[in-house]
Image (cartoon, rainbow, N blue to C red):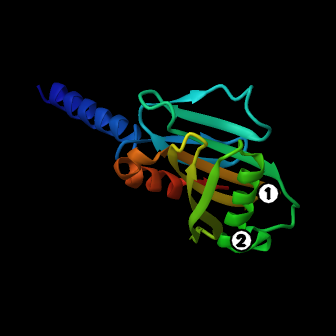
Amino acid sequence: MFKSVRILVLTIISLTLISCSVGLAGLQSYVDAADGYQFLYPSGWVGVDVKQSSQGVDVIFRDLIEPSENLSVIVSDVDEEKTLTALGTPTEVGYYLLKQMNNNAENGRKVDLINAELREVEGKTYYNLEYEVTLPNQQKRHNLASIAVSRGKLFTFNLSTVQKRWNKVKDLFETSVNSFSVY
């Protein structure tokens, strides 16, 4: 009798621990040990093949139900000696990326930087950026990014959704962006 109760308790504890590892408040963990970064992403999202993606795109996830919601991590080379702050302030880097998006954008796309802030975690500096994008068809999107420099690499974590869903996913997306870390 005592043995079966002990087995039942151990089983319940194991199942509890396994279910806790699935995610934090609707988020799952992704770790890329080879490139040295990790983040949390929304449950129900799936990985997308990056073979046909732009250069530097390391990973893409997309929502199964709302496929226009997506995240990506882009890894680029920078001088080994460079730090994120050496590239500029959060606002300067945000405007630099905005200029890149507008230069590479389809005709008629408008991108506005609406927030840029510095975040420090365990001795690493991150810039969190927020953009509003108006596409040529006048559809509005909301983009969040977290940027870091580590080991001669510039890491850009991007999350994007249509504006009409922003209020529903804002807290989840902000948690995801703030979870992005490099090592």
Q: Residue furthest left?
A: 1
- The residue at 75%/73% (across/down) is 88
Q: Which one is in front, 69 or 14?
A: 69
Tell me where residue 81 appears, x and y as whole percent: 87, 67
Disc marking residue 169: none
**Which x, y percent locates residue 179?**
51, 55
Residue 22 in view? yes
Under mark 2, the amino acid is Glu
In screen coordinates, is 105 left or right of 69?
Answer: right
- Looking at the rendered structure, the kind of residue marked 1 is Arg
The answer to whether the residues at label 2 and label 1 have Cβ atoms under 8 Å apart is no
- The residue wearing badge 2 is 92
Question: Where, by quadrant of the figure, is residue 122 drawn?
Answer: bottom right
Q: Is residue 24 visible?
A: no
Q: Residue at x 38, y 55 (%)?
A: 171
- Left or right of 139 in this view: 18: left
Determine whether 158 is above or below 115 in the image: above
Kindly identify the residue that appears in the image at 74 percent across and 26 percent down. Answer: 52
Q: Residue at x 17, y 25 (%)?
A: 4
Which one is nearer the viewer's eye here, 24 or 75?
75
Q: Nearer the viewer, residue 37 or 147?
A: 147
Side of 79 relative to 56 (left or right): right
Could you tell me which secondary element the residue under label 2 belongs to?
helix
Q: Are there few (<14), some (14-19), or many (20+) residues within 10 Å of tag 1?
A: some
| Residue 151 spot, x, y in % from top left | 79, 57
- The residue under label 1 is 151
Give the mark, 2 or 1, whose residue is nearer the N terminus: 2
Quadrant into which the C terminus falls = bottom right
